[in-house]
Amino acid sequence: MSLMEKIQETKNFLEAKGLTAPEFGLILGSGLGELADEVENAIVIDYAEIPNWGKSTVVGHAGKLVYGDLAGKKVLALQGRFHFYEGNPMEVVTFPVRVMKALGCHSIIVTNAAGGIGYGPGTLMMINDHINMIGTNPLIGENLDEFGPRFPDMSDAYSKDYRAKAKEIAEKIDVQVEEGVYLGVSGPTYETPAEIRAYQTMGASAVGMSTVPEVIVAVHSGMKVLGISAITNYAAGFQSSLNHEEVVEVTTRIKEDFKGFIKAVLAGL
Ligand code: HPA
């Protein structure tokens, strides 16, 4: 089956389940999936049921799709995403974004846990741009002309308009939100201190193992993107050691601010 046929099949499956008019796709990163529990009139579907869908394997990722109302908007939320480091082909990593677009989402809000370069644990960082250090690109291969052009413009990948609105909203609800460049790596190793020094020189404020592929595919298809990183640790070299438990622990600590911010942003966009 071609990628277009897979997208169509999955779209038909989800529409038959009642996912008819999503506006915002919401990708919830490590430890941040709880927001989906607040979706009202929810239709919840296990990833395992969805045709052509990947499988979630990481602790802190639930593996459920939740559709319904959140802050007055129709959202299609993903509790758990597919990472390249799990061995998923890029087609699988970005498939949910393709399906979001096919179902009618005009925008996605992408979230992740990330290591901070400068910013410390507990910081919420709005992504204003990214650097792709994954070593590949999800659009390599035949272009899906139905979705977008062969050579997509990435000049405004993280919508300037959305960033300005989100910043205003953060001030209004008194949640501190920083801004910076997210550098995406493949993982699964955390970075070496020398890599982090190099990334700092390149202009990165945060580093993580997701988001970049999904955003590239979203931008390709003309979706507007808002990206939020929850900084869970100082990147390598700025603290003595790194582990996944700490990442989950810190996201648990800041999730109330995170949830409040995303809901206020959804209401205001
Ligand atoms: N590096 C890469 N990915 C991450 C980190 C980090 O320090 N923290 C959370 N995700």
Image (spheres, grey):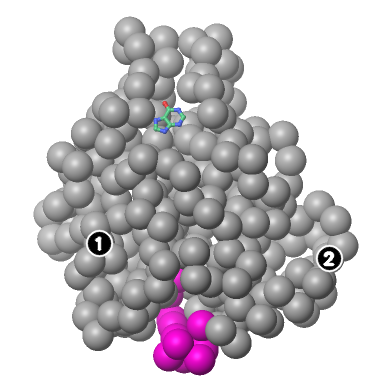
What residue sits right under mark 2 in the picture? 143
What residue lies at 22% left-to-right and 66% top-to-bottom? 37
Q: Position of residue 141 (x, y in %)?
A: 85, 56
Q: Quadrant of residue 132?
A: top right
**Residue 86 shows up from this direction:** yes
Q: What crowding class fits label 2: few (fewer than 14 Cα within 10 Å), some (14-19), or many (20 or more)?
A: few
Numbered label attached to residue 35: 1
Q: Residue at x 50, y 91 (%)?
A: 16
Q: CA distance from mark 1 to mark 2?
A: 34 Å
Image quarter of residue 172: bottom left
Regarding residue 219, the answer to whether it shows in the image is: no
Residue 144 location (% of width, % of height): 80, 71
- In the image, farthest residue toward the right: 142
Q: Is residue 221 left or right of residue 159?
A: right
Q: Please, is residue 63 above or below residue 44 in the view?
A: above
Q: Quadrant of the C terminus?
A: bottom left
Q: Nearer the viewer, residue 133 or 18?
A: 18
Residue 59 % position (x, y): 36, 40
Asked if residue 20 is among those painted magenta in the image, a careful observer would answer: yes
State which region is magenta: 14-25
Q: Is 160 left, or right, of 195 in this rendering?
A: left
Q: Secondary structure at mark 2?
A: loop
- Label 1 element class: helix
Quadrant in which the N terminus appears: bottom right
Mark 1 closeness class: few <14, some 14–19, many ≥20 residues within 10 Å: many
Instruction: Give whichever of 262, 54 is nearer the camera.
Output: 54
Mark 2 is on which residue type?
A: Asn
Q: Which residue type carries mark 1?
A: Leu
